[in-house]
Image (cartoon, coloured by chain):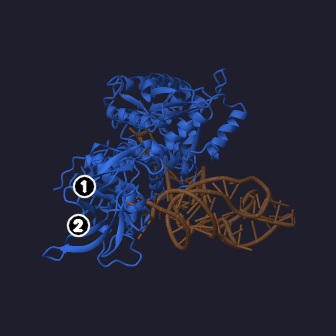
Chain colours: A blue, B brown
Amino acid sequence: MMENEVVRTNFIWEAIEQDIESGRCNQVHTRFPPEPNGYLHIGHCKAFITDFVAADKYNGLCNLRFDDTNPAKEETEYVDGIMEDIHWLGFDWKGGLFFASDYYQKCYELAEDLILRGLAYVDELSQEEMREYRGTLTSPGKNSPWRDRPAEESLELFRRMRAGEFAEGRMILRAKIDMASPNMNMRDPALYRILYKEHHRTGNTWCIYPMYDYAHPISDALEGITHSLCSLEFEAHRPLYDWVVEVCGFRSGDGKGYYGPRQMEFARLNITRTIMSKRYLRRLVEENRVSGWDDPRMPTLCAMRRRGFTPASIRDFIDRVGLSKADSTVDYGMLEHCVREDLGSTAPRAMAVLNPLKVVLTNWPEGKVDTLTMENHPDHPELGEREVTLSREIYIEQEDFMEDAPKKFFRLRPDGEVRLKGAYIIKCENIVKNGDGSIAYLECSVDLESRSGTPGAERKVKGTLHWVDAINCTPVEARLYEQLLLDEGEVDDETDKKDFISRLNPNSLECVRGFAEHALDAAPVGAKFQFLRMGYFCKDKDSTDALSVYNRVVGLKDSYKPQ
RNA sequence: UGGGGUGUAGCCAAGAGGUAAGGCACGGGACUUUGACUCCCGCAUUCGUAGGUUCGACCCCUGCCACCCCAGCCA
């Protein structure tokens, strides 16, 4: 990042600044509130990066709060995974770690108070009846017959709900707002439901659980959150959010300059052809379509980490995408660009050949082994050098040789010359074929005067190839990962949700066998290589995807066994 | 259909009465011990649409159109 980089602003920053100027907010305090019912995916990054960066930008704090108000779906495994992923991206919840379940008691007390004040009541309508009474988008709802029961009666019932005297669904606590409101969310929304489910943290202490719309504003207020950022679909919930804040007495201020939380919404992230819904990702895992949440084809952070994405590239991506309220779908190419850019400037290079074609250097002295020194990065000498050997037989990429090459083909062709990266210039003298006409190997002569680093290396040839020493290399089995993308078609996102599995690209996993220089073998998973560049040799669209080519390397350490 | 939102290039996205930033993608060129990277150049006479106000409109007003969200005891 350049220091003088123009910091892009957005409507959220502006709103926060106004709140600071107007004195409505002394210290910015945000929170990222994931529900621990799955692993975080790239889409969540937009949310939590926004939360953390907003806090950072205004010298405020950001909390991590698990929104665990539905014990039926939540597990501890996910809270650990989520924390790991956030840390991996380089963020920390300096404001503290919380759980909505920390506030169950407080929520309960506030609920009793609301009942006493006639702002909530226990309803005995069945779920179906409730739906009928709610009305439709165009017609107002009607009051429940239980709506005006005495507060004392509701309180009594609510206490018995908590005591476990009623079956699930038998009763519910509702806010008393307006059944005729044009905003469906205000038609006496549910506040508490009965659920005999063991909670991952509170166990069986509770059998009634607060709804999101009730617990969220309270949690925000209790933590002193000033700006509660969320996605667009909650926009219509804001009146209810504010209602809860007001009615629970959080809007009046705490005397220390806290005026209660303010909800602000922005568009969530969509990426072309990418499944961006926890629900469907979860289905892929449960149906064993993938090996797990961290299957490298998944758009989850743990999977992207395994593939070799860097935190910096993801942060850069989110930064470039921007923040607005317009529904949008970002081109997958934008993400690829970000990884490519980060890896291209930081990744140490090494060579490997995935689809090997043997080349015999005819005039190379039998038994001679030359040791060449190669830089690990063309622009970063501090990344050091490594030694690579060259002997009589080497491998080059099959696609780097063409028998009938077009004029613009800069690689190896019959009688053509090419430089072996960091080594010598070779010339193709002969093609040795198998009985079936396929190429067995090439016989090439070497210009022994052209070794890199010597005066003879001045001679220019138009092509340069990567290669590995056939005698001194490591066989590798690489997996080529492409993200689990939806096939292109009329629908380029996950709109066609019903049948998304059948539209998944089945070619997203491919095994490739080849050879790599020894340095590669010692490299850690996630190390970045020359592969990044190899892809650019191909004019073919799929092969030019540097990311997928790069992923072949990440997969090197994988224990994948082809069937 | 009621309510809430959103429409600026193929895709994101700035601009907030003074004459359309930037990025991705794309096209052209230079450079190159990989054609990558890097570097130049090009890429909206027009901002969903039709009117209106104004010396001047993406920006203000009116009508229309399109898309998204809301009828969970999910979040």
User: Where is residue A341 drawn, in percent x and y?
Assistant: 48, 52
- Tell me if residue A315 can be seen: yes
Up/down of A277 relative to A416, above or below: above
Chain hosting mark 2: A
Chain hosting mark 1: A
**Screen quadrant of the C terminus of chain A:** bottom left
**Screen quadrant of the N terminus of chain A:** top right
Q: Nearer the viewer, mark 2 or mark 1?
A: 2
User: Where is residue A427 drawn, in percent x and y?
Assistant: 31, 70
**Displayed quadrant of residue B17:** bottom right
The furthest residue to the top: A255
The furthest residue to the left: A435
Callout 2: few (<14), some (14-19), or many (20+) C-alpha neighbours within 10 Å? some
In the drawing, does residue A350 fall left or right of residue A216?
Answer: left
* In contact (CB < 8 Å): disc 2 and disc 1: no
User: Where is residue A367 drawn, in percent x and y?
Assistant: 19, 56
Residue drawn at the location 15% of the way across and 73% of the way down: A434
Q: What numbered label is drawn on residue A515?
A: 1
